[in-house]
Amino acid sequence: MIGGGISSSFNGYTYQTPNQPADKGSILRVNTDLKVGYFNWEDIGIGLKTNLSYYNRQSDSTSNDLRQTILLVGPFVRGYLDNGIFGEISGGWGSNNIFRISQSNLFRGEAGIGYTYFLGDIGRQNYWLRNKQIAIEPMLLFRYDRQNFGAKKNSDNYRSEYGPELRISVQVYFLRQTMMLPNPIRGGRRAD
């Protein structure tokens, strides 16, 4: 199994603190995922997942601009039911380059459920090949991010984010059989 997804968002923000002018601006987020896995058992796959995220905050009123790139790598495990529904858990550890200072004490954990919808009727004239290797996968998951600041891994100074996320990705399942449909009938006779 190999695949990945991409997501992006663009939104405005306002930070208000007492006795300070409001900080307003815009935020651009771009997130990409890549997974490579193997089904060791019939319905359970394990593999490696990488995540590359870009965050750009542009302030309209102050100089609080921020650009951040995060790279996370870690394992994932996925289990399927017979009807295409799957569950997946993953963990990732990595680093970022916030304020031109590289930090390597980031962690992300995810757990969720999804559905695998195999694309069908792919081919030159939509009847030569029915594809059971390429799939679209919507997934609802819960995500937890934590970044420690300071020299110690268990520092009391940290930032964490958590909450639900909806993700849509494309997966390619290698080593799966494809089903050839019969040749079309030409001129009233079946082509040999």
Image (spheres, helix red, strand yellow):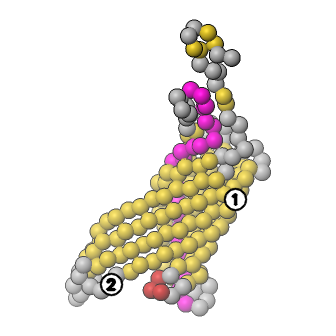
Q: Amino acid at mark 1?
A: Gly
* Pick the front one: 174 or 51: 174
Instruction: Return the residue nearer the eye: 157 or 66.
Output: 66
Marked residue nearer the N-terminal end (1 or 2) = 1
User: Is 174 located above or below residue 9 in the figure?
Assistant: above
- Residue position marked by numbered label 1 in the rendering: 47
Q: Which residue is mark 2?
A: 64
- Magenta stretch bounds: 127-150
Residue 166 rendering spot, x and y as whole percentages:
47, 54
Is residue 149 magenta-colored?
yes
In the image, what residue occupies the spot 72% across and 44% down?
175
Q: Residue 50 location in percent, x, y?
A: 60, 65
Q: Farthest residue toward the right?
A: 40
Are the residues flagged by discs 1 and 2 in contact, CB closer than 8 Å? Answer: no
Residue furthest bottom in the image? 151
Secondary structure under the numbered disc 1 in the rendered image:
strand
